[in-house]
Amino acid sequence: MAETRLHTCMLCEAVCGVAVTVDSGARVLSIRGDDRDPFSRGHICPKAAALGDVSSDPDRIRGPMRRVGDRWEAISWDAALEEAGTRLAAVQKQYGRSALGVYIGNPNAHSYSAALASVFFGKLLGTRSKFSATSVDQLPQMLAALEMLGHQLLFPIPDVDRTDHLLMLGANPLASNGSLMTAPGIKKRLEALRARGGRLVVIDPRRTETAQMADAHHFIRPGGDAFLLLGMLHTIFEESLDRPSRQVHPATGWDELRRIARAFPPERVAGRTGMAAEGIRALARAFAEADRAVCYGRVGVCTQEFGALASWLVNALNVVTGNLDRAGGSMFTSPAVDLVGLATKLGQRGHFGVWKSRVRGLPEFGGELPAAVLAEEMETPGKGQIRALVTVAGNPVLSTPNGGRLDGALAKLDYMVSVDIYRNETTRHAHLILPTSFGLERDHYDLALYALAVRNAARYVEPALPAPPGVRSDWDVLFDLGLAVRRHGGGKPGRALTLAARGIGALGPKRMLDALLRIGPYRLSLNALRESPHGTDLGPLEPRLGHFLGESPVKLAPPLFVGDIPRLESALASRGAAAELVLIGRRHLRSNNSWMHNSLRLVKGKDGCTLYMHPDDAEARGLANGDRVIVGSPRARLETTVEVTDAIAPGVVSLPHGWGHDRLGTALRIARAHAGVSINDLTDEAKVDTLSGTASFSGVPITVERAAERAPAVSPARIRAWE
Ligand SMILES: Nc1nc2c(c(=O)[nH]1)N[C@H]1C(S)=C(S)[C@@H](COP(=O)(O)OP(=O)(O)OC[C@H]3O[C@@H](n4cnc5c(=O)[nH]c(N)nc54)[C@H](O)[C@@H]3O)O[C@H]1N2
Ligand SMILES: Nc1nc2c(c(=O)[nH]1)N[C@H]1C(S)=C(S)[C@@H](COP(=O)(O)OP(=O)(O)OC[C@H]3O[C@@H](n4cnc5c(=O)[nH]c(N)nc54)[C@H](O)[C@@H]3O)O[C@H]1N2
Ligand code: SF4
Ligand SMILES: [Mo]
């Protein structure tokens, strides 16, 4: 008999409530949006249906696997944990604790149990060689929060449901469903904004799906955002459009910011932004004069040469116009589990630059090093060289800059363990793959994303599907693996931590979540949430900066950012030969980073991995729609298909990330048949936002030429890794 169970989609950040209908054999018959979820109101996207595909995917890893040479064999959990503990501890004993690296990927944030367990996991391993997807994503926004607001996780959230003017830079929520802005059904929310007379303005080198529904869209040169924002601030100060009296929470640094902006009149930055000076002034006036306005920047603003400066200036624009912590402006969520509030009370705010990476000297952030240095830290001999690695729900070969180099470096490690559900481009290098339960097989409360929601909400669901018998929960795997490494004695014994971890590990994630809900702002509990299985609405965002800052002011001009202005100046001054073409990324509604391409329902049909090119650029190269081309950067040459479209700015081309599934040794049959190429074979690990260490994906100089009949278009690193 069929039965319908409630769950929450955990693929992207929108936390859509779903109703999963399963048959008596626990096979998924359908996945629909839950109309009765007060937050997501029935919204889902095409990816939700693929949740069942991943669970039942024949290629999924369903029990621990050990690699012997290039052969894989099943191994018991006891033997696997014993081997991993012995080998990883041996590396730490011989070469020091930080010779063991850890890389934590994106899906970790989408499981409350994994997110909580990984904190202990990191402490148990006791290494400084920690990496995550943060440094190829939102790090600049965290740095801006740390420096301006005093906590690295205090993300300002655009109050989209009440604003009159949304200025959006480097985000495409119609494809991504919103990021650092949990807003299920974002398209409807944006339609409502326009229906109530508000304006949506999009700044993007591509006329995206979101730009197409906006009131206005302006092309920008990749990496031009910090210049644009300074030009806008210049106008606002020059025309006395700033609103110090409207800014409720006090802010310092007003004069310093005014002084900085004075040096960037729109006429001066126009060239670097690709926008007309008068256009920049008009943007500034419209924003400052709107009753309730919010500037929102996301991945396109972060992963670029001046990502940290741009992220700072987005916040600064909101403050200067009196829109921070104000309804319809940039606000702060009050989640049922308030980890930021808790951490603030404990005095844990995050840190930056306390130590530097060994080889290149890039700064740590919150105890992690930039993913852009991972390969060099493995390849460069000397004390502290990374010789073993654990990846947890990450695929850095496809997701970090110059993945090809990393691919080669992983193949040379002494030992590697991957906690993952697939044998993919990264995990194929592991000596052991430890598989976890997935998605609908877990209970779910969205610890991370309810804390970033545009409305306060909570929902707890029990597992909707049984997990395959051979896998374990992420919680158990992380605690067991961490404790195994401890047991085999990596470095100091650390008895207190070991005992605490053993106790907390045995307590389980539910008890921990329940405790966090009970001490949260609404004094909820798991049982209270269970009483509203469709979810609970906890009301609109309320001003709450005082809760975090007390009397402390917002810092409008933190010295860290002010100190980086000379780099902007020199970029303006150096009018070197502009690259012919620069590369940016893109997301698609039917794709999710690197790991949903083994679902036939998502990849069938039109090729998802094509190169967008403006008609002028195509004509200049004699290229037509559908032609095969070679895209070249100093890192690789790849063959792909060109898609001619005037929706991309002239001089800019775009490839999506997360593709390139034709590498040897993976076990992803459908993805291999829809392989595409990896943009991160082309991107450059040397190109980072040097202030924050974040990868600079936007604006990679490349060349495009017609492919010869039979072009040898394989990245050299890909061959090297398997020689
Ligand atoms: N369908 C789908 N949804 C996803 C994901 C996915 O892979 N697929 N991934 C999830 C993840 S991990 C994240 S972090 C979020 C990201 O969510 P978003 O930030 O909304 O991500 P994108 O759709 O990549 O939008 C980034 C935009 O920045 C533009 N851009 C590139 N360079 C520049 C620049 O220099 N300046 C400006 N102003 N714009 C620029 C690009 O053209 C693109 O339109 O999406 C999440 N949701
Ligand atoms: N050029 C370019 N590069 C980018 C981006 C871009 O816009 N352009 N975007 C960047 C961004 S925003 C991000 S967040 C990163 C993502 O970078 P990563 O997190 O490194 O990569 P993902 O593709 O999300 O890979 C997730 C991995 O987790 C596994 N997995 C999925 N679910 C589970 C689970 O429940 N448990 C376990 N144990 N494993 C699971 C998958 O099999 C896969 O191996 O990519 C970044 N890279
Ligand atoms: S929008 Fe995101 S959370 Fe909602 S169904 Fe799609 S992938 Fe899942
Ligand atoms: Mo991300």
Image (cartoon, rainbow, N blue to C red):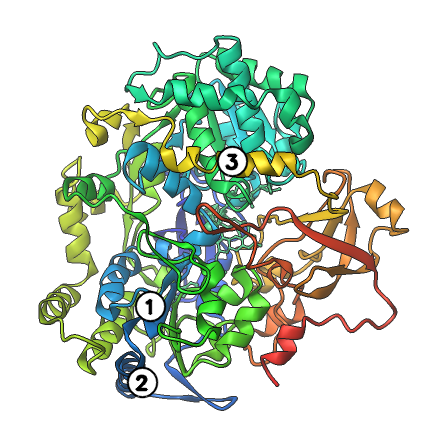
**Badge 3: residue crowd in 10 Å (few <14, some 14–19, many ≥20):** few
Q: Amino acid at mark 1?
A: Pro
In the rendered image, the vertical position of residue 382 relative to residue 182, given as above or below:
below
Q: Which residue is mark 1?
A: 466
Q: CA distance from mark 1 to mark 3?
A: 56 Å
Q: Amino acid at mark 2?
A: Arg
**Badge 2: residue crowd in 10 Å (few <14, some 14–19, many ≥20):** many
Q: Amino acid at mark 3?
A: Pro
The one nearer the camera, 440 or 706, is: 706
Q: Is residue 699 left or right of residue 643?
A: left
In the rendered image, the vertical position of residue 606 relative to residue 285, given as above or below:
below
* Local secondary structure at mark 3: helix
Classify residue 602 by image quadrant.
bottom right
**Residue 397 — which label?**
none
Whether the residue carrying mark 1 lies under 8 Å from ligand 2 is answered with: no
Q: Which residue is mark 3?
A: 566
Q: Which residue is mark 2?
A: 87
Residue 365 place in picture, x, y as percent:
35, 51
Label located before the other in sequence (1 or 2): 2
Residue at x-position 41% and y-position 70%: 420
**Badge 1: residue crowd in 10 Å (few <14, some 14–19, many ≥20):** some
Residue 37 appearing in the image: no
Where the N terminus falls, by quadrant? bottom left
